[in-house]
Image (cartoon, rainbow, N blue to C red):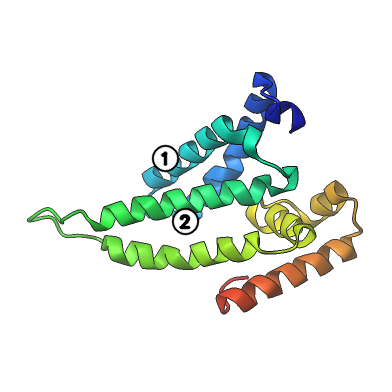
C-alpha cells in the first residue's frame, strides 16, 4: 500500500488487480444493470489508480472504494431516470423502480463505512468478500469467537441504521 501511494506502478497494478473482484461484486449488488456495474467498477478502479496517493489511512481503502462505487451507481441511476421509454417497447422495470431498489444498498454502504475499523474489516471480509470465518479470523489474528463477536456487533449496527434487511 505504501509503495502504491508513493507511485510505484507495479504496486498500484497489484492493488488494482487485487481489488477488482471485490469492487465488481459490490457494484453488481448496487447498480441497476450488469453493464452499469461493470462501468462503475472500472470507474472506481480508475479513480483508485489516479488518486491512491491522496489516501491518508491505508485502512480506509475499502470504505473509500465502496463509496466510489456507490456514488457511480447512483450517478448512473440518476442519468437513467432522465431517459424516456421507446414507443412500442414494453419496459420490464422502470429506472425509478431500479433506483428505489438500490437506495437501500446505498444506505447499507454508508452504515458499513461508519462502523469502527475492527468491525468494518470483519464485516467486509466475511459478508462482502465472502471469505470463510476461519480465513477472516486467521487474516486478522483473531480467535474464531472474537471474529464472530465483531461480526455480530457489525451486523447489528448496520441493521440498526438501515432498519433491518438481510444484515
Residue 21 placed where, x, y %?
A: 59, 40
Residue 147 placed where, x, y %?
A: 84, 61
Helix, strand or loop under label 2: helix
Task: Name the one closer to the observer, 32 or 56.
Answer: 56
What's the residue at 50%, 55% (across, down)?
Answer: 29
Q: Is residue 24 above or below residue 11?
A: below
Helix, strand or loop under label 1: helix
Residue 26 placed where, x, y %?
A: 54, 51
Decide which of tag 2 and tag 1 comes sooner along the chain: 2
Task: Name the one closer to the observer, 160 or 145.
Answer: 160
Q: Do the residues labelled 2 and 1 touch (CB within 8 Å)?
A: no
Would you say 159 lies left or right of 104 here?
A: right
The numbered disc on residue 107 is none
Would you say 49 lies left or right of 62 here?
A: left
Residue 104 placed where, x, y %?
A: 48, 68
Q: Name the residue under label 2.
A: 30
What's the residue at 48%, 36% (across, down)?
Answer: 42
What's the residue at 7%, 55% (across, down)?
Answer: 87
Which residue occupies the extreme top position in the image? 9
Callout 2 environment at 10 Å: few (<14), some (14 to 19), or many (20+)?
Answer: many
Callout 1 environment at 10 Å: few (<14), some (14 to 19), or many (20+)?
Answer: some
Question: Disc 2 to disc 1, how far (Cα)?
Answer: 12 Å
What's the residue at 79%, 57% (across, down)?
Answer: 133
- Quarter containing the N terminus: top right
Q: Name the residue under label 1.
A: 39
- Quarter containing the C terminus: bottom right
> Total label count?
2
Residue 32 position by quadrant: bottom left
Q: In this view, does 165 lie above or below 110?
A: below
Amino acid at each position: 500500500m505504501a509503495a502504491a501511494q508513493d507511485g510505484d506502478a507495479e504496486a498500484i497494478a497489484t492493488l488494482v488487480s487485487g481489488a477488482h473482484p471485490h469492487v465488481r461484486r459490490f457494484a453488481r449488488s448496487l447498480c441497476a444493470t450488469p453493464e452499469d456495474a461493470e462501468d462503475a467498477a472500472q470507474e472506481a478502479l480508475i479513480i483508485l489508480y489516479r488518486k491512491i496517493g491522496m489516501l491518508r489511512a491505508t485502512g480506509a481503502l475499502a470504505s473509500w472504494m465502496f463509496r466510489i462505487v456507490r456514488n457511480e451507481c447512483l450517478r448512473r441511476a440518476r442519468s437513467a431516470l432522465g431517459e424516456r421509454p421507446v414507443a412500442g417497447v414494453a419496459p420490464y422495470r422502470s429506472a425509478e423502480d431500479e433506483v428505489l431498489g438500490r437506495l437501500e444498498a446505498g444506505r447499507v454502504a454508508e452504515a458499513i463505512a461508519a462502523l469502527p475499523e475492527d468491525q468494518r474489516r470483519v464485516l467486509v471480509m466475511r459478508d462482502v468478500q465472502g471469505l470463510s470465518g476461519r480465513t477472516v479470523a486467521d487474516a486478522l489474528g483473531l480467535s474464531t469467537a472474537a471474529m464472530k463477536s465483531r461480526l455480530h456487533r457489525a451486523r447489528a449496527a448496520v441493521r440498526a441504521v438501515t432498519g433491518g434487511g438481510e444484515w
